[in-house]
Each structure stands twice: as structure tokens, then as C-alpha cells.
Image (cartoon, grey):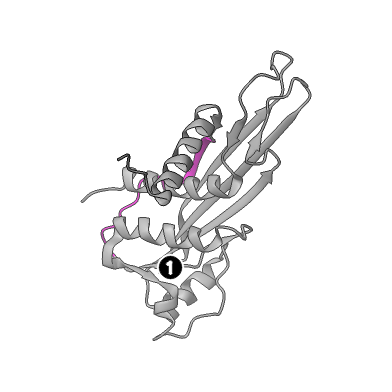
Amino acid sequence: MKLKAPKKNYAKCLSFLIMILFFGFTSCNTPKYTYMFKEGKHLDFSEGKWLLNRSKSNSRVFDTELYNNSEEQFKEILGSSLLEIVDVRLTNIIAPEISFDLNKEELIKLHKDSGCDFLINIKGNVISENAGSLSFPSNNSDYYATNEASVSIKIYDLKNGEIISSSQVNGKVVDQGSEFNSSNDFPILSTSAHTTMLKGAKRLINKYKKYQINN
């Protein structure tokens, strides 16, 4: 007697096969990243209390993820020395919103109000989302579209009221037409600008981890 495979297992196998066929006949277009440290590439994270401000971005998709991922990564560098602003507000009176760019007076006041020594500010920016997630090669040489995002980090010394690090990462996916493209070419899967922003933040924070001064 021939046994029949359960319908659920058959459906799973079919879905898996479709995924293999789909990704087997598509090409991936991933972002290229560039980094810039205006100052403070090598930091000593071994002393003091480090206050992580709420991140700011124009991404409605991954705004919360930007903060959560950044907190997790800086936690790997700083451990218990990293304090979230929501927790510090439970015992200290701090302004309801802290700007990304701060002057000396604002920094010194925040030092007194929070009891922290350093401030970490993170800002994400989705620049363009013109390439979309799935596209087909174009033989129009004038066609040019991008999924682009950037992440900026500023770290301040609150006690002295000065910036000690300023960095930025820019990630860009380019979808460009060519007269040599054929209608038989495979479709292209492009990384979204929102995902590019998240991955860019991770890469930039990893730079801080890589270049930190170990005492």
C-alpha cells in the first residue's frame, strides 16, 4: 500500500521549492558603504557613564529598530556603563527632548541634570527609495535609480561641554540602465533604503568597537 505525504508537508516542500527557484533566477543588488570620521575615531570607553539618547530618523519602518539595534551594539562596547535616557529620567529631571547638535551650555547642563559623563546621539536618514525592492534590467542608458540612506553619530563629553567624536556612514544601492541589458536578464532584488540605514548603523558602531582604545 502506497503512503501519501501529509498535505502540510507537501505545502511546505512546495513553498521551499518556489523560494529556491525564485532566488535562483534573481540577482541581488546590495549597498556599498562609505565611512567618514570628522573626529574621534579612537575613543576610550573604559571610564564614565555613557548616556544613549533616543535615536532620530525619518524612517517610519525601522525607526524603533534603529534605536534598539544601536543600544544592543553599544552595550557590547560599554556594558553596564551604557545608560538609556528613559531609565535616567526615572530618577533625574531631564529636558523632554535632547537635540542632535548641542552647544557647550546645553551639554554642561545635561551633565548636571543627568549625572552622566558622555552622550551618544544617533541620527538616521533615508535619502532615496527610487530603485524599489524588485526591478528588471533596463536597456535605457538614461535610467538611474537609487536606494540610499545615511547614519550619523555624535558623541559628547558632557562635563567639558565638547564634542569628542563625529562620524557618518552612507549606504547606496544603484540600479542603472544599460544598452547592453537584455530582456532575458534576471530580475534584480535591491536592498531597501530602510534596511540600508539599519545595516549602516551596525557597521558604523562596529567601527567604534574596532578602533576603541583598550587600556
Helix, strand or loop at label 1? It is loop
* Residue 170 locus on image (x, y percent): 56, 41
Residue 173 is drawn in which quadrant? Answer: top right
**Neighbours of disc 1 within 10 Å: few (<14), some (14-19), many (20+):** many
Q: Is residue 121 visible?
A: no
* Residue 159 locus on image (x, y percent): 40, 69
Q: Residue at x 20, y 51 (%)?
A: 215
Name the image quarter holding the N terminus: top left
Q: Is residue 190 magenta?
A: no
* Residue 113 locus on image (x, y percent): 44, 81
Q: Is residue 182 above or below residue 176?
A: above
Residue 98 is drawn in which quadrant? Answer: bottom right
Q: Residue at x 69, y 16 (%)?
A: 182
Q: Amino acid at mark 1?
A: Leu
Q: Is residue 69 above or below residue 92?
A: above
Q: Name the foreground residue: 135 vs 62.
A: 135
- Residue furthest to the front in view is 1
Residue 45 shown left or right of residue 170 in the figure: left
Q: Residue at x 54, y 72 (%)?
A: 106
- Which residue range is magenta in the image? 31-47
Q: Is residue 191 visible?
A: yes
Number of marks in picture: 1
* Residue 76 locus on image (x, y percent): 30, 56
Residue 139 shown left or right of residue 196 in the figure: right
Residue 72 shown left or right of residue 104 in the figure: left
Q: Name the foreground residue: 28 vs 123.
A: 28
**Residue assigned mark 1:** 158
Q: Is residue 44 above or below residue 169?
A: below
- Residue furthest to the left in view is 215
Q: Name the foreground residue: 118 vs 189.
A: 189
Q: Residue at x 64, y 20 (%)?
A: 185
